[in-house]
Amino acid sequence: MNKIIIIIILILICFLSCTGKVEKNRIITVTIEPQRYFAEQLSGGLFKIVTMVPAGTSPETYDPSPVQMTDLAKSSAYFQIGKIGFEEVWMDKIRKNNPGLPVFDNGSGISYIISAEDHDQDHSDHSDHRHHAHAGGVDPHTWSSPKEALKIAENMCKTFIEIDKENEKTYMENLKRLKTEILKTDSIVTELISKVSCKSFIIYHPALTYFARDYGLNQLCMEINGKEPSPEQFRLLIETARSGGVKTIFIQQEFDRKNAEIIAAETGCKLTIINPLSYYWSEETIKIAKALSDETYE
């Protein structure tokens, strides 16, 4: 009798293990780390979320490894963030190599900011953040603003339900929790930005365009049309920072700090290293707002 019981227990363990393994092997691939954060909050472990552009690398220049391209065949779906450099270069190849892979756009319904194609621009105009966006196309950094992050989360939730209708209730409950977190982040950022005395800030690469638009700020970029500033543009940027009372310079961790350090030394601005591609989306968003604020949020 004891042997029979042991055999039954072993069969049950094997069955449960195998069932759990199927669940764990369901994979969704996303492009960047902030997407992985949102997707993991929504999926609640029902899918494993894999990022194509690893932490610490730039989605404007990253090329996937052969292993990554091969592993895509294991995914249940691919979630695009929309308009980012990596996707502009690689999505056609990804679709061609994986004809059966469903691809969904998390950026659906977002009001994209179109960058101005002005190679002779200067930094004297404080009124229009669009002049400091990506060259010749759409600024992709939608997730930098909590207001756009809400749309991304809602799009993701709809997609999870589309590919896994059986767990719709779970996804809707998880969306409710995620939206609460995003709205709390928005509230904290709004309070912090209300304490900002200077509405302009300097950044190397224009990663905060939507953040600036949605919170009434002005983004001044060192990078002009994807290139290092000319000596004249550099001089104008320093003059603008001085005359406008700019207090903050942001530099992304993947870029060279040399120019940012020169401007900081010339103007007395505070230099802050940020990571808009951080997995820890809420913490990083609040950190950026704190750096701009004249007070700290507790």
Image (spheres, helix red, strand yellow):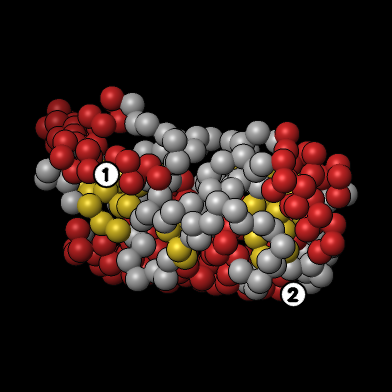
Which quadrant of the figure contains the C terminus? bottom right
Say whether residue 42 is visible. yes
Report the side of 162 relative to 236 (left or right).
left
Task: Look at label 2 and name its amino acid.
Answer: Ser
Looking at this view, is 65 or 33 the one in front? 65
Looking at this view, is 110 or 127 the one in front? 127
Looking at the image, residue 274 lies above or below residue 188: above
Looking at this view, is 280 or 104 the one in front? 104
SS class, disc 1: helix
Say whether residue 145 is visible. no
Dot placed on the residue nearer the N-terminal end, 2 or 1? 1
SS class, disc 2: loop
At which x and y percent is residue 202? 71, 54
Give residue 128's mark: none
Task: Look at label 1 and name its amino acid.
Answer: Met
Report the side of 291 relative to 265 (left or right).
left
Q: Which residue is mark 2?
A: 194
In percent of the image, x 47 and y 65: which residue is there? 113
At which x and y percent is residue 47? 30, 48
Q: Which residue is mark 1?
A: 91
Q: CA distance from mark 2 to mark 1?
A: 40 Å
